[in-house]
Image (cartoon, helix red, strand yellow):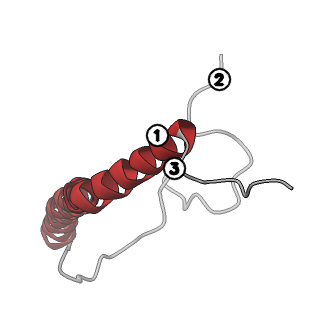
Amino acid sequence: MSTPATTNTAKGNGAAVLGIGAAACAACCVGPILGFLAALGIGTAAAFTLFGMVGLVVAAIVGLVMHRRRRRRAIGCAAAPTTVAVTAPVSRSGSAAVGRSRPPWPRR
C-alpha cells in the first residue's frame, strides 16, 4: 500500500508564497500603474489638442491677413465707369487709317 502524496512540500510552499506575493503586488501597484498610464494618455490628448488649437489660430490669422489684402486691392483698383471716346487713327497723309496697305513709318 502506498501513502497519499502531500502538497506541503518545500517546493510547493515556495510556489504558494510566490503566488501570494505576486497577487499582493498586483493588488497594491495596479492603482499607481493605471494612474501613470492615464496621466500619459491625458498628457498626450492635451498636447494633441494644444497643437491643433495653435495650428487653427495660425491658419485663422493667415487667412484673415490674406482676406484683408485681397479686399484692399479690390477696393483700391476699382475704377469708376467712364465713357471713353475712341476715334480712328489718322495717317500722315491725312486720310483715315482704315484699310491702308503701307506701314505708317517711312520706307527707305
Which numbered disc flags the more N-terminal residue, 1 or 2? 1
Q: Residue 75: image x %, image y %?
A: 14, 73
- Asked if labels 2 and 3 touch by Cβ distance under 8 angstroms, the answer is no
Secondary structure, mark 1, is helix
What is the number of the mark on residue 107?
2
Tag 1 residue: 14
Q: Residue 1: image x %, image y %?
A: 86, 56
Residue sitting nearer the eye, 23 or 71:
23
- Asked if residue 42 is positioned above or below residue 19 in the image, the reply reads below
Three-letter code for the amino acid on which mark 2 is drawn: Arg
Which numbered disc flags the more N-terminal residue, 1 or 3? 1
Spatial separation of the CA atoms under disc 1 and disc 2: 120 Å
Three-letter code for the amino acid on which mark 1 is drawn: Gly
Secondary structure, mark 3, is loop
Residue 55, located in which quarter of the rendered image?
A: bottom left
Three-letter code for the amino acid on which mark 3 is drawn: Ser
| Residue 43 makes an appearance in the image | no
What is the number of the mark on residue 91?
3
Spatial separation of the CA atoms under disc 3 and disc 2: 14 Å
